[in-house]
Amino acid sequence: MDLITMITIFVLAAFVGFEVIAKVPTTLHTPLMSETNAIHGIVLLGGLIVIGFANSTLDEVIGLIAIIFGTVNIVGGFLVTDRMLEMFGTKKKKKADSGDGAE
Amino acid sequence: MPLAALAPDSGLVGLLYIVSFSLFIYGLRLGTHPTTARRGNGLAAVGMAIAVITTLLLQGIGNWGLIFAGILIGSIIGAVASKRVKMTEMPQMVALYNGLGGGAIALIAWSEYRHWVHIDKALSTSGEITSRQDLRELVEGSHLSIKVIPETFQIFGSVPLEVLIPTLFAMVVGSISFWGSNVAFGKLQELIPSQPMGLPGQKVINGLLLIGIIIGGVVLGVNNDLGDLSQPLFIAMLVAAAFLGVMVVLPIGGADMPVVISLLNAFTGLSAAAAGIALENTALIVGGTLVGSSGTILTLEMATAMNRSVANILFAGFGSPAGAGAGSQEERPHRSMTAQDAAIQLAYADSVVVVPGYGLAVAQAQHAVREMADELEKKGVSVGYAIHPVAGRMPGHMNVLLAEADVPYEQLKEMDEINPELPQTDVCVVIGANDVTNPAAKTDESSPIYGMPIIEADEAQQVLVLKRSMSPGFAGIDNDLFYHPKTSMVFGDAKQTVSDIVSELGEL
């Protein structure tokens, strides 16, 4: 892929990101941050690529650490965001559901 | 070996990555409303799973043992941490995760660079490359981005600039983000003092470090023949960036943490996007850029909410040792009252607005506050919450804490929404908040916080301030609100005081 294509993708993604995220209300900024934490866990892909081609122990160690960091971000980030968002908005519905179950 | 190894340049990989980052964008889009945000988060997670699986299926990916070990360890740590972390600790966690992301990127960039150096050495020491086939065998299973070599069929002795520049950027910014975030984490977790700390001549040192890093990058770029010095130079840049990260965040006080966390979030995202360009991975570019945009928006919003520029927060900082003189005020008269009196005052009000601050979070008083609101509503008092944009230690932190305590979403009012209602409010209860209610921000041009938008608690008919003592807040500025004739102070631990008020209300 040539550099210009990649820069095009970068610039378009930046505009899309600004448009979408500017609409997130202040109330949801903390979950937004932890969700973006999870999304930047996408560096895991970089870790997978470099460890696949590691030609020394040092590179393997570097890659392993990068994979662990990236996975913690992804798993921890999405789960904790879910935990937070569960407290917003869906509360009443959940109570109703459990009420139904009890009956 | 995977059943279906995908060629890195096959269309299918590109398509799957498009599905993946579309889910990120759509997921974030659903994040604009509390009722849909949870589903959005789930969709983004599905997108991530697709991206990871696609990458695992790439031709030439190997080292399965290490890959699965890493993913397993990371998943366990992530899952356990996400269950255990308290909502008050969310800023620390986000800081730590920013750091992990930045650290991972710096490491990946380093490995990527080492990889290119290795290829170069292999090419220059092996004199047997006489055909395109030899070259291909040499680089086979080597690296995805190596495919440029057969095209030119030249034994080039350098890293292509379009790889080198993003790699260096990713390494430097990732390293700054890693170390800066760890310092921020340390401050939030109170492992290091949250007060601003600085060395004499710190700005000069930071400037020199930055210049050194830039010069190092230019040298590697111009003198790009991968001599034996290139690796030590690369590592020196990595270390300099690490120092820069520590030195920039260390002098920043606790009150500015929402800005710092957002900024480091943006840094991590941008470095991930740069790594994506170096590795020619579209999912990485888009994912990183989205995070970069988000962090940038939050940084600017937080800075606006404090009426300060980002540069001012990073480099000047009030609350820096030479800044605002704390304790210069002599004793001034103020009124204090007991929890019992406060309860009576609240019970006879028609409308009450609670202004929660970080002190509430520290005291874990959010549940007690919710009980107080319930008691008041039973008595026919209307209750609302006024949330300042920088209340808490990260953007939106206070909303999460109150949501955790089951406070209905509709009762949470943003600053611009609540300020016009405050003059008609009978009692404004300020709990563990200080600077965000300081009227000096409106009236006193000499005040360091002059111009900062505030919750106009002083406009309410009566004010109750729940606080441990008369000590000034993080900014080290005395709050005129506390000495106002219509203000009564209720001293003590916020949680204890609110609980006392709740039990008094129950008896009334």
Image (spheres, coloured by chain):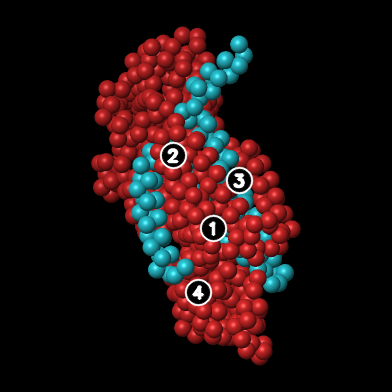
Q: In which quarter of the image is residue B239?
A: bottom right
Rendering coords of residue B50 (x, y %) = 56, 49
Residue at the (44%, 43%) spot, across then down:
B26
Considering only vertical position in the picture, is A1 above or below B505? below
Q: Quadrant of the N terminus of chain B?
A: bottom right
Q: Nearer the viewer, mark 3 or mark 1?
A: 1
Residue at the (46%, 73%) spot, across then down:
B162
Chain containing mark 1: B
Amino acid carrying mark 1 in the image: Val
Q: Is residue B143 visible?
A: yes
- Which chain has been coloured red in this picture? B
Q: Residue B13 carries which label?
A: 1
Residue assigned mark 2: B31
- Which chain has been coloured cyan in this picture? A
Residue assigned mark 3: A75
10 Å neighbourhood of mark 3: few (<14), some, or many (≥20)?
many
